[in-house]
Amino acid sequence: MKVTSMKLLMFAGLMAGGLAAPGTASAQIWAELEREVERGIRARTFPGAVVVVGRRDTILHARGYGRVSWATGAAIPSPDSTLWDLASLTKVVATASVAMRFTDRGVLDLDAPVARYLSSFSGGRRDQVTVRMLLDHTSGLRPWAPLFREHRTREGAIAGVLAEAPRVTPGVASLYSDLNAILLGLVLERVGGAPLHLLAITEVFAPLGLSDLMFEVPSGDRARTAPSRLLADRTVVAGLVNDDNARRLGGAAGHAGLFGSGLALARFAQAWLAEGAPRGARWVSDSTIRRFLTRSTPTGRRTPGWDTPDTTRPNTSYGALRTPTVVGHTGWTGTSLWLDPKADLFVVLLTNRSISPRGNRTLDDILLVRAAVSDAARRAMAAVCAEQSVGC
């Protein structure tokens, strides 16, 4: 069912704690952002998308664009109900957030060697790798390994990860790696005494009321899930995680496997902007939130879990108007989330770029869309503040 933009905004306001009252110029305020998303659809970078923009207690904009697949008559995406394969957003929304809760309770030591929790991950350079290095990607492990090809079972794949050794000296440079998040997930399972997908529910999703975040899409929810996997015969699959290694690891891994809606991610972002106390309910201490938003040394590129803009590049997914306080993450399927504590602003952009007929060329295309949407969102927020005569 197609829902009007205003109805979506009203629903979003109820779900996320308030809605900025629209003025006569509201349509024009968001026109630039909408043009950029629709340009991505016309360029066939992705068939559809949802965008949610807001502050710690307000949803400013929530809308679906295009359709969930290239099929004629496919459903129009909805910010509140369509589920997306979040890909590497799993790393921060689930894995790093569980780690933050454990750190807050004092049961996980970020500066302890990984071997303290996983005795099999030891010997040589492995002994130098700490939990923090898994979070800020300074472990020195290689970016990726074909676990799904090298191992036929989950147990075999886990053994393969534990056998990995850093390719460079740990703690020296930032090298983004799925293996870091997979290992961190195993650490959390050992500390929490439960599978990662259950830890994510008890530590993150349930406390924040995020029922539309899940590692396994039930059969009854497949119809509202945007497909993310393109098979060899060009058919698309909804509800099956796109990442091959995540599937080999059982569908729930530290690096990928999570599905969710735009408004669920909005509420997640609001919990961070509210310094761990969304809608007055304490989730994590404000000091721990700030700790996980602070850039790590020695590289200064990442926080424990989050990415930050690369200042050596003229443009990034964060846009030309990025600020030093913004943190975020992206996902292979075409997803992204960033939040800016100083500006009190977040932007969720969810797409299924991974089923685009343009193939891997869409990696460059989606970066440009993310950047344009990011800048448009900042300009729109400034316009909203001016229209409503409130400080921002």
Image (cartoon, rainbow, N blue to C red):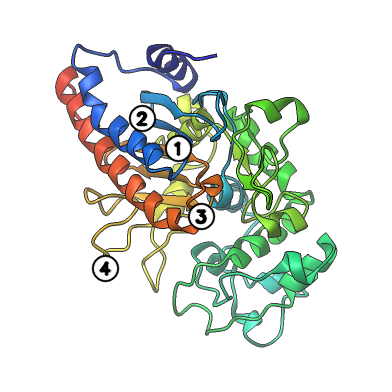
Of labels 1 and 3, the one closer to you? 3
- Residues at badges 3 and 4 in contact (C-beta under 8 Å)? no
Sequence order check: which comes first, mark 2 or mark 1?
A: 2
Disc 3 crowd, CA 10 A, few/some/many (<14, 14-19, 20+): few
Looking at the rendering, which quadrant does residue 343 occupy? top left
- Dot 1 or dot 3: first in sequence order is 1
Tag in front: 3 or 4: 3
Which mark identifies residue 89?
none
Mark closest to the chain's N terminus, 4 or 1: 1
Label 1 SS: helix
Point out which mark residue 54 bears. 2
For disc 1, the neighbor class at 10 Å (few under 14, some 14 to 19, many from 20) is many
Q: Residue at x 49, y 19 (%)?
A: 15
Instruction: Identify which amino acid the numbered label 3 is placed on.
Output: Gly
Is there a contact, CB below 8 Å, between mark 2 and mark 1? Answer: yes
Residue 307 seen in this snapshot: no
Could you say which quadrant of the image residue 348 lies in?
top left
111 w.r.t. 259: above or below: below
Q: Is residue 358 visible?
A: yes
Q: Nearer the viewer, residue 171 or 175?
A: 175
Instruction: For marks 3 and 4, give the CA distance.
Output: 27 Å
Q: Amino acid at mark 2?
A: Gly
Where disc 2 sits, the SS reads strand
Q: The C terminus lies in which quarter of the figure?
A: top left
Q: Horizontal and vertical percent for residue 100?
A: 56, 50
CB atoms at circles 1 and 3 under 8 Å apart? no
**What residue type is disc 4 on?**
Thr
| Mark 2 vs mark 1, CA separation in Å | 9 Å
Count of numbered circles on the image: 4
**CA neighbours of label 2 inside 10 A, class few (<14), some (14 to 19), many (20+):** many
